[in-house]
Each structure stands twice: as C-alpha cells, then as structure tokens.
Amino acid sequence: MMHLPGGLLIDDRLERGFALTAPSGSLDMRLHELAETSVSRPQWLTDLLCELLQHLGGEPATRARVERLCLADRQAIVLAWRARREPDPQWWHLRCHACEHPFDVPLSLQALPCSDAGANFPFARAETSAGQLTLRIPDGRDLCWLAQQQDKPETRKALVMRLLIEPTDVALSDDDIAAIENAIEAEVPELAETLDADCPECGATNRLTLDPCQGLVPALDPLLDDIHRLAAAYHWSEADILALPEPRRRQYLQRIDGDRGMQTGYAGGLR
C-alpha cells in the first residue's frame, strides 16, 4: 500500500493509502483515448487517475473520491505509476547554461521532495476582517474549474468563495483574499517540481523543471506492434491481447523472439 502526502477525508478519517491497478494493453489504449478526448489537462488527469487507481483509503476509487484529491496527491499517484513502469533512477541529459558543457543528472521519481500537509488538512483556517473563516483545500474539481476561467480578474475571489465552508456570506477585501491564500498554502503539501544541478565543469547551478505527468501515455506504435506480432503468432483477437497483463504480454513476446533466434528483451516506449 502506497501513501498520499495529503489524504482523503472518509467518514471523518484522513485516509492516505492507495493502490494502483495492474498495467495492461487495454489500459494503455484507454489512456490514449483519454488524451484525445479530455477537454483540459486537469480533466484529463482526473480521468486518468480513475483508470490508474484501484483503491483509495482501502475503498474503491470512485470518481467522486478521485475528484477530491488535492494537487500534490494527484501528482504522487502519477509518480507512483511512472516509477512502476520506468527505470529508477532516470538520467536527465543537460547542457550547462553558463559553459554549455553537457552532463547527466540521476533523478529518482520515488525520492522527489514533498512538503508535509498542515495540521488542519484538508481544511484551512484564516483570520480576516470578517473573523476566522474555514475553507476546504482546493481539489480536482477546483482545478478543472480554474482551467475554464481563462485568467479572469475576478477568478481569485471566485475561487475563495468556492472554498468557503463557514461562513459563506461574507464580504472580503484584497487583504482578506491574500490572508486566505496564505492559510491554504500553509496546509497543502507541495511536491518539488524544480531541482538544482551543479555543472561538473564550471560549477554553475542549472535548474531542472519537472513535469510529473510527462510520459504517462505510452507510445501507441509499440503497442500496435505488439498486437500485430501476437495476433500473427497466436491468432488472438485484439481484445484478447489487450486484456493480457503487461508482464504476461512481455513473456509471450520473448518466446516469439526466442523462436526466431532472437535474445532481445521486450522494448516498450513512452512519450
């Protein structure tokens, strides 16, 4: 069982455990479909997490529960899935911004720094001119809403009003909005998305920007190649091949290569 940095409130208990579903060709194909049909990146990530998760807090990972995950929890699940399918550590190839010397940096997806959730998570309490206000932490629903707002001037206040739990009928100044944003920031866990790497040649610090969602959608051509090879060798249908667990698919492909006198292992691709 893996654990979220924030967690999900279920029956007044903060549950942090989660379990991933098993990789398969049908899941990979579904991830491609979602990449083509989701209306925004936050919506795509919600759709994707519904496919990747088996359990949240020991209970089924329903869409309603997935939508309530904060950003850091969503990113943690994505990284856990990537760590399952990608080599660890990864090697990032950089060119120094100062001397242009190329160098490599090892990066472990499982060891990325993440701050702890605050004591009030998944809530925040802010002192304002209207008194103490209680708010919920922004979650997937709010991220999807924000993606539709197109940076409107009133978005900051509108988001705060969405998050207010009590009281909900208050007039808020700009200073109140800032105090609320600071209170929320103090409660939410945050995953490090930038890392510094020193050039071994000149010592200059280079900043590496990470995208936790990079490489989540497997390359389609290798999957179609797998289907073609297995269908030609065993005369199975596409649905039967896609239903195979990924390790089983690799084992059959290795046997096909063995019959042809090849000793190469399975090679998948990610984009």
Image: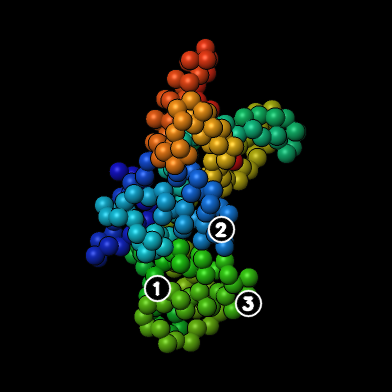
**Front position in the image: 95 or 2:** 2
Badge 2, how many Cα within 10 Å: few under 14, some, many 20+? few
Badge 3, how many Cα within 10 Å: few under 14, some, many 20+? few
Q: Residue 37 carries which label?
A: 2
Q: In the image, what residue occupies the spot 66% across and 29% down?
A: 103
Residue of label 1: 135
Q: Can residue 116 be seen here?
A: no
Badge 1, how many Cα within 10 Å: few under 14, some, many 20+? many
| Amino acid at circle 3 | Pro
Q: Are marks 1 and 2 in contact (CB under 8 Å)?
A: no
Q: Are marks 3 and 1 in contact (CB under 8 Å)?
A: no
**Front position in the image: 207 or 109:** 109
Q: In the image, what residue occupies the spot 41% across and 38% down?
A: 240
> Which badge, 3 or 1, is on the more N-terminal residue?
1
| Amino acid at circle 2 | Thr
Q: Nearer the viewer, mark 1 or mark 2?
A: 2
Residue of label 3: 153
Q: Is residue 61 above or below residue 133?
A: above
Q: Is residue 270 above or below residue 77?
A: above
Q: Is residue 135 above or below residue 82?
A: below
Q: How many marks?
A: 3
Label 2: which secondary element? helix
Q: Can residue 215 be seen here?
A: yes
- Within the image, what quadrant is residue 74 found in? bottom left
